[in-house]
Image: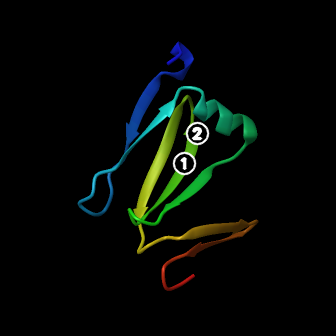
Amino acid sequence: MAAHEKEEASSTSVDDADAFSSSYTSNFPELLRRLGISLVVSTYQAGKLILVRAQGDELNTHFRPFFSPMGVAYQPDTGRLAGRREA
């Protein structure tokens, strides 16, 4: 692994007993910042919604529990999360 791709770890607490953490390459926060974006990731099997954004030179992640999150949709001023039995 190249020096500029050194993995760094960031973790955050969650409301339930499951512990989660994230790893990322050192250039990922800069890429998000340069594109002017944040990410929302749904994890169906783990039952989490992950919010990802650049915060300075670090990656900031928030893990939120949801029952079987299956997809995310976004339009300016609104967002939707689809679950196993609801949207």
Query: Disc number at residue 26?
Result: none
Mark 1 burial class by Cα count in 10 Å: few <14, some 14-19, many 20+ = some
Q: Nearer the viewer, residue 12 or 19?
A: 19
At x 27% / y 58%, what residue is drawn?
Answer: 18
Location of residue 74 in the rendering, given as x and y in whole percent from the top left corner:
70, 66
**Is 18 on the left-hand or right-hand side of 73?**
left
Nearer to the camera, 15 or 73: 73
Give SS at disc 1: strand
Q: Is residue 60 left or right of residue 19?
A: right
Could you say which disc has been placed on residue 54 in the image?
2
Q: Three-letter amino acid code at disc 2?
A: Ala
Residue 77 picture location, percent across and down: 73, 68
Give the residue number, with chain letter if any, for mark 1: 52
State the image coordinates of residue 48 (x, y, percent, origin top left). 42, 62
Looking at the rendered structure, the secondary structure element under dot 2 is strand
Residue 34 lies left or right of residue 52; in this view the side is right
Q: CA distance from mark 2 to mark 1?
A: 7 Å
Q: Residue at x 34, y 50 (%)?
A: 20
Q: Few, some or many C-alpha atoms within 10 Å of disc 2 (few <14, some 14-19, many ≥20)? A: many
Judge whether 50 appears above or below 74 on screen: above
Please name the amino acid that badge 1 sits on: Val
Residue at 48% across / 21% down in the picture? 6
Is residue 10 positioned above or below 77 on the image? above
Residue 14 lies, in percent from the top left, at: 33, 57
For residue 63, above or below residue 76: above
